[in-house]
Image (cartoon, grey):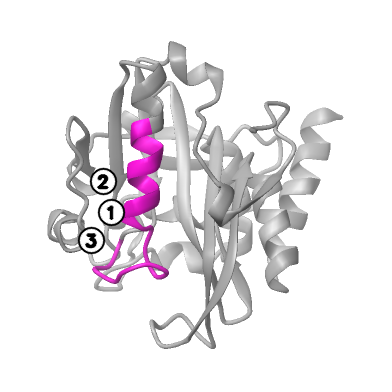
Amino acid sequence: MFNYGWRRVIFKASEFAFKPPPLISRARRVLIKPTAGYPMPYPISTSREILNQIIEGIKQISDADIIILEGTASGESIYPVYQALGYDFPRVLMLDVRDCIWVEVENPLPHPFAMPTFWIPNVVLSSDYLISVSPFKILGGSGNFSVSNLLSLLPVSKYKGDAPGGWGTLYDFGMDKVMADLYFTLPFDLAIVDARQKFTSADNSFQGKVEEYGKIFVGEPYEVDCEATRAGGAEANYLALIEAGKAELEA
């Protein structure tokens, strides 16, 4: 029951079954980006259950190589995290951002909000279809959905600055501006926000409240994040910036 015109779609979790868009049938390489930077179970991280459903759905219509790609904020290996989260899918290539070759990619916006270029793993650029899969998290009042999920595709070694880890230099520009620029520079085809449960934290810690929510959002990343933001009563200032960027590109 996908809407292939990329209008946002909200499923009841009990009725959700991943049906790959037809473009995937022609893809040679499909890349999936989960939220999996820490060995914390769903709803902190992307659940193994929904990743498996997506992977099996892709295999039903395509012989494409399937890649899962993630990186840690510490810059340490992601593989122990994959193991802790049970990411052990057959015939799926598990990669670490830190091991990739990085390519500097120009922001297509005529007037970038903060970043005229980003360093991007080359495997992202060589993939034919890109899927962001994230849980439904609200941290410090701000939505943490599909676009913010892309941040950990950026190599920590390039952006940590003087900090021991993380993407410290980007915070100096304002993360809403950075995320808006990242949305245009790294255009993902599909976003899935797994809102079977809603996680709310007063800050960016793993201490918070978990509520049953029973929804799954599917569609184009900007549209999905708009819907998830409204549903969660969250702030997401980067969405207004993305809207302004779209208007500039269309003008």
Residue furthest top in the image: 26
User: Residue at label 2?
Assistant: 97
User: Residue at left 53%, top 47%?
Assistant: 192
* The one of 172 and 62 positioned closer to us in this rendering: 62
- In the image, is residue 231 above or below residue 82? below
* The one of 92 and 49 positioned closer to us in this rendering: 49
Residues drawn in magenta: 37-56
* Mark 3 residue crowding within 10 angstroms, few (<14) / some (14–19) / many (20+): some
**Of the residues shown, which amino acid type is indicated by label 1?**
Gly
* Mark 2 residue crowding within 10 angstroms, few (<14) / some (14–19) / many (20+): many
User: Residue at left 63%, top 51%?
Assistant: 180
Q: Nearer the viewer, mark 2 or mark 3?
A: 3
User: Residue at label 3?
Assistant: 85
* The one of 117 and 225 positioned closer to us in this rendering: 225
Q: Position of residue 28 (x, y in %)?
A: 35, 15
* Mark 1 residue crowding within 10 angstroms, few (<14) / some (14–19) / many (20+): many
Q: Work out whether mark 1 precedes mark 3 in sequence or the reverse, and give the earlier one.
A: 1
Q: Position of residue 4 (x, y in %)?
A: 67, 26
Residue 71 marker: 1
- SS class, disc 1: loop
Looking at the image, residue 189 sits to the left or right of residue 120; the answer is: right
User: Residue at left 24%, top 68%?
Assistant: 39
- Residue 146 seen from this side: no
Q: Are marks 1 and 2 in contact (CB under 8 Å)?
A: yes
Q: Position of residue 25 (x, y in %)?
A: 45, 15
